[in-house]
Image (cartoon, rainbow, N blue to C red):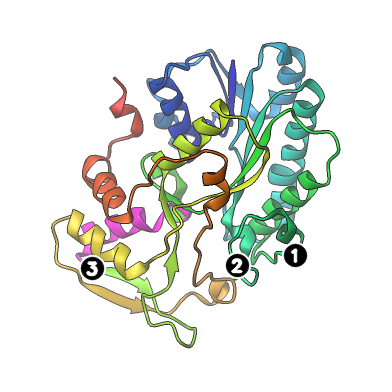
Amino acid sequence: MIVVTGAAGFIGSNLVHYLNHNGFNDLVLVDDFSIQKKQRNITNTRYTLKIHRDDFFEWLVKEQRFVEFVFHIGARTDTSEFDPAVFDKLNLKYSKSVWQICSEYGIPLVYASSAATYGAGEYGYDDNHDIIPKLKPLNPYGISKNEFDKWVLQQQQQPGFWAGLKFFNVYGPNEYHKGRMASVIFHAFHQIKETGRLKLFRSHKAGIADGEQSRDFIYVKDITKILIHLMLNRSHSGIFNAGTGKARTFIDLAKNVFTAMKKEPVIDFIDTPADIRNKYQYFTEASMQKLREVGYSQPFYSLDDGIAEYVSQYLMNGSYQQSQLV
């Protein structure tokens, strides 16, 4: 029996589908299933049980002997939310409880961290444990993720195997419900579809031209492959980056979306909103050496190929990942 928290969300639902693709159907899905926008993400999935996140701990303690693995993907991910109490409850305290129960009963655990922990990148983007206490995230979401990473590294009692994954900029199917927090590709597609044009943030940093801000964008299908690999190959516990290792500019992204939509690029630059301007990352690029060293050898989708597939197979016709089930 495999548990997936955040199972109706973006990454969680893709993981559920990928588990099904690989013959894993004895799944326990944990989430707040009252959110209607997320229901289509798990349509046609195969699972044993659905549990509301508030009832999960009681169930886990009672049924722990049947649980083979826990993927703790559920979290509050809104980087525009600035109330630390929200993240303290849903990201920090909840995750500590998951860790403690898995540690007590020896249940292997993989949990979601974030590249938001790296802040402005003062210490680079290396997933060395030694730099984690020094990191300076730029928003409460990133702070909550880094606080949990720091707490984990201080724990004497641990699951027999555990891994934290610092997700970089993930995009792909089943993010329709995410609103403002959906990927740049998602928003670019809809903006181009509606207006024929795309707005990108102007650079407010010397030495970086408009549109040359860059991110490590990773297709969600690569994320699910990493997650499954860690479940099946439990050789080394630790905190790992989950990106492609190659930063790409927003101009690159924009041109690829236009190309996938068979349109000529028309790009306008606008000021970065004042409320996030001082908390804006101008560059992220994951060091992927550590994950490679523990045996993950699969190639990653290029941004070009990932956008082409996402736009043509999903966004153009409003499809969800479940449409790919065989």
Q: Choose mark 3 or mark 2, whichever is in front.
A: 2
Q: Determine whether label 3 and label 2 are within 8 Å by CB.
A: no
| Image quadrant in which you'd find residue 67 | top right
Q: Which residue is at the far bottom?
A: 206
Residue under label 2: 124
Going by the numbered disc 3, the residue's amino acid type is Arg
Can you say whether 117 is above or below 10 in the image? Answer: below
Q: Mainly helix, strand or loop, the magenta region? A: helix
Q: Which mark is residue 67?
A: none
Going by the numbered disc 1, the residue's amino acid type is Lys
**Quadrant holding the N terminus:** top right
Q: Determine whether label 1 and label 2 are within 8 Å by CB.
A: no
- The magenta segment is 181-196
Query: Tag 2, which secondary structure?
Result: loop
| Image quadrant in which you'd find residue 82 | bottom right
Residue under label 1: 134
Q: Would you say residue 190 sits in the magenta stretch?
A: yes
Classed neighbour count for the residue bearing mark 1: other residues with Cα under 10 Å, few (<14), some (14–19), many (≥20)? few
Q: Which mark is residue 197?
A: 3
227 left or right of 66 in image: left
251 left or right of 201 in image: left
